[in-house]
């Protein structure tokens, strides 16, 4: 089996999205309200 | 040993209303998805923007109830991210961004004719002071000056508008300027930048 090694390690740089973005997504999810009325979907963000 | 909960279970719980399941899903796939996006766009801010947009789409689809769990949650999320990466490159192609680095500053080559904030503030103050001086003029002189300076009317038009001869209009303008200068000198007003 041929082993292929990456010569440039930066091509494998591991990054993570910061916690403030995650918090935003969680808050967005909590505030998102979806209503389906007669086949029409309404999205709103509640306070 | 950390217990890894299956994606299908987390998705099911989230769709049932458990917000905590979403947090577990996001944290579970954060590094993998972010690294994938970063490997394409090579920009951390853009990576986080695309990551955020990806999960906003995921959240909307799950909340609508239009997701069918087939054991391919991560593949689906990666596909959304992939499409957003393509959108990102298309946008950048239409509107290329230039970022200055330490060696070269584009603003050393191209100029911006707009006044900076300080000059803008000074100019606004001068305009305000000048307006107040004009208000102090006799009515006929004020009218001619306003028409000439602010409405860019010719003296012929001013004369027709005010019902006087052109020479009278010219005379009123001359006296308006003389009077303004007198007030400026008398009160030692500075109207220059």
Image (cartoon, rainbow, N blue to C red):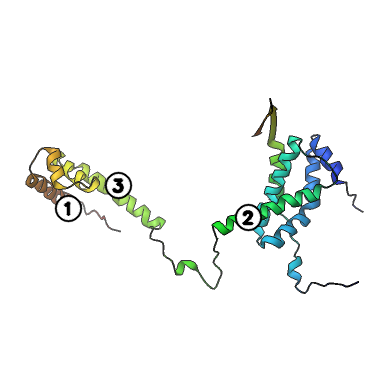
Whether A3 is drawn above or below B65: the answer is below
Q: CA distance from mark 3 to mark 1?
A: 16 Å
The residue that label 2 is drawn on is B88
Q: Which residue is mark 3?
A: B128
- Which is more foreground, mark 2 or mark 1? 2
* Cβ–Cβ under 8 Å for marks 3 and 1: no
Task: Name the image quarter holding the N terminus of chain B.
Answer: bottom right
| Separation of marks 2 and 1 at Cα, in angstroms | 59 Å
Q: Which mark is residue B181?
A: 1
Spot occupied by residue B6 in the image (x, y as percentages of width and height): 88, 46
Q: Is residue B154 left or right of residue A47?
A: left
On the image, which quarter does residue B39 sit in?
bottom right
Q: Which residue occupies the extreme top position in the image?
A: A38
- Crowding at dot 2, Cα within 10 Å, few <14 / some 14-19 / many 20+, comes out as some
Q: Secondary structure at mark 3?
A: helix
Task: Mark 1: give few (<14), some (14-19) or many (20+) Cα within 10 Å.
Answer: few
Tell me which residue sits at (83%, 38%) in the image: B13
Q: Quadrant of residue B34?
A: bottom right
Q: Residue at x 7, y 47 (%)?
A: B167
Q: Position of residue B79 (x, y in %)?
A: 74, 51
Is residue A15 positioned above or below B138 on the image? Answer: below
Q: Position of residue B95 (x, y in %)?
A: 54, 57
Q: CA–CA distance between discs 2 and 3?
A: 46 Å
Task: Identify which residue is drawn at 15% across, 43% down.
Answer: B158
Which comes sooner in the sequence, label 2 or label 3? Answer: 2
């Amino acid at each position: 089996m041929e082993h292929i090694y990456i010569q440039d390690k930066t091509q494998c740089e591991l990054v993570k999205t910061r916690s403030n973005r995650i918090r935003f997504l969680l808050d967005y999810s909590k505030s998102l309200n979806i209503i389906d009325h007669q086949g029409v979907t309404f999205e709103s963000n509640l306070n | 040993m950390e217990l890894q909960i299956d994606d299908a279970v987390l998705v099911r719980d989230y769709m049932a209303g458990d917000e905590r399941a979403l947090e577990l899903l996001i944290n579970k796939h954060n590094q993998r998805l972010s690294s994938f996006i970063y490997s394409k766009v090579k920009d951390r801010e853009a990576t986080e923007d695309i990551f955020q947009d990806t999960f906003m789409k995921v959240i909307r689809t799950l909340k609508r109830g239009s997701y069918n769990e087939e054991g391919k949650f991560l593949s689906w999320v990666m596909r959304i991210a992939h499409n957003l990466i393509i959108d990102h490159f298309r946008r950048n192609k239409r509107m290329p961004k230039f970022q200055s680095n330490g060696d070269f500053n584009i603003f050393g080559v191209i100029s911006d004719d707009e006044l900076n904030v300080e000059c803008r503030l000074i100019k606004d103050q001068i305009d305000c002071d000048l307006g107040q001086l004009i208000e102090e003029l006799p009515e006929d002189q004020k009218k001619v000056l306003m028409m000439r300076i602010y409405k860019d009317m010719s003296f012929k038009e001013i004369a027709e508008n005010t019902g006087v001869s052109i020479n009278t209009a010219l005379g009123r303008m001359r006296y308006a300027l003389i009077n303004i200068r007198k007030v400026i000198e008398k009160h030692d007003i500075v109207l220059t930048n």
